[in-house]
Image: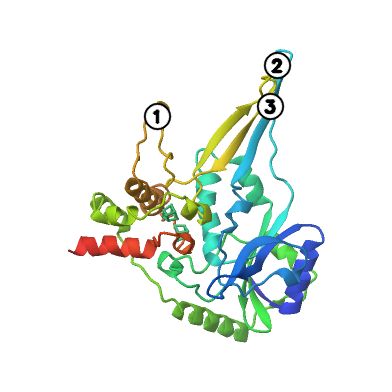
Amino acid sequence: MLFRTLAKPDFKALVERILASTEVIGPKRVGTDRHGRPIHHYLPVESFDEIDLDYETTEFSAKTYFLPYKENLCSYRFQDDDWRQEIRYRIQPRAIIGLHACDIHALIKLDKALARDFFPSPYYISRRKNTFVVGIDHDPCEGGFCRSLGTDTATHGFDLFLTDLGERYFVAIGSDRGFRALSGLPAAEITEQDTEDYLRVRKRIAAGFKTEINVQNLPNLLDIEFESPVWEKWGGKCLSCGSCAMVCPTCYCYGVSERVSMDFASGAKTKQLYSCNLIDFAVVAGGHNFRPNRQTRLKYRYYHQHRGFMEAYDEPKCVGCNRCGRTCLAGINPVEVIRDLQAEDET
Ligand code: SF4
Ligand code: SF4
């Protein structure tokens, strides 16, 4: 890994240079919640000044720029005993400025499932490869437990990663593309002082975490507690709204529907993200529902996050961002659910 420092006005110049030719997404303040706390979303911006890099978290993750909630997989048309199919991948470049480390880890996990597994998704890959990612360090967000999952800092999965040192950024360069982006800018070789300042900031961030969970042995615990009353307790509250999966940066379950025109001349296949908490998630042809109650659906989500993904990719799917906990109207919070399971195991 190469490191440089870049004065803040020079970083602004870099973003403005990218803006001249590329769509840029950044954390944008869109309002305040009922407690007066700012609400941010990752949105397209037209100038650097619209980006608020001091944001705490965003309500939605940046997943939508890689896995849109709804996308056309293909369109087709029948003609003269034949048919023609049209498939479009996103090839326009895009830049996302200011992703936090946990969201970069979320992309790394999606890469494993959607770009490197047996059935890679060309739709995902085209978006991922055409997106320039600039990450940034930040102080812990309320309720975030990313440190417990090892996702509070990123060493790859980005093009550039910034740490705020006051007047300048400490910049980790994660790709050739990131290296080239700095060309022509007065990015300086790091000094001993820069390294000291960087380590001091990292130490301050690490000391700021208030929420921690122990995920050691969690996959085994989930198997042991498969019939635990904890699932009744939390599942009984669940409204089956699916919001947790929609805001989650790593949930990628989806459904595909096909619509054919009334004259049978054309049709289209559409993919839509889905949530395992929705009532019909496990309905199969013939109408049988393998998970008719909300307890088993909630349990399934936790099993995929902390057991199934672990078995497939040697790491949990959850990055500890707590977006699901923040958004859940029923007050279901992953930290409390996991702590309850652990307490169950101790009784
Ligand atoms: S957001 Fe809460 S209530 Fe809605 S499906 Fe998820 S756990 Fe259930
Ligand atoms: S399960 Fe919840 S805490 Fe974990 S990555 Fe998804 S939204 Fe974040």
CB under 8 Å between discs 1 and 2: no
Q: Amino acid at mark 1?
A: Gly
**Position of 244 compared to 107: left or right?**
left
Provide residue 34's location: percent of width, then percent of height. Answer: 54, 71
Q: What numbered label is drawn on residue 241? A: none
Question: Which is nearer the N-term, disc 1 or disc 2?
Answer: 2
Q: Nearer the viewer, mark 3 or mark 1?
A: 1
Q: Can residue 19 be seen at all in this image of the molecule? A: yes
Q: Secondary structure at mark 3?
A: strand
Residue at 47 percent across and 50 percent down: it is 242
Residue 40: which quarter of the image? Answer: bottom right
Question: Which is nearer the N-term, disc 3 or disc 2?
Answer: 3
Residue to which mark 2 is pinned: 82
Residue to which mark 3 is pinned: 76
Q: Amino acid at mark 3?
A: Tyr
> Closer to the camera, 152 or 3?
152
Alpha-carbon neighbours of circle 3 within 10 Å: few (<14), some, or many (≥20)?
Answer: some
Alpha-carbon neighbours of circle 1 within 10 Å: few (<14), some, or many (≥20)?
Answer: few
Which quadrant of the figure shows ligand 1? bottom left
Instruction: Please say if 240 is above or below 184.
Output: above
Q: Secondary structure at mark 2?
A: strand
Q: Amino acid at mark 2?
A: Asp
Provide residue 298's location: percent of width, then percent of height. Answer: 37, 50
Q: Which residue occupies the extreme bottom position in the image? A: 193
Gap between marks 3 and 1, in whole Å? 29 Å
Instruction: Please say if 71 is above or below 167.
Output: above
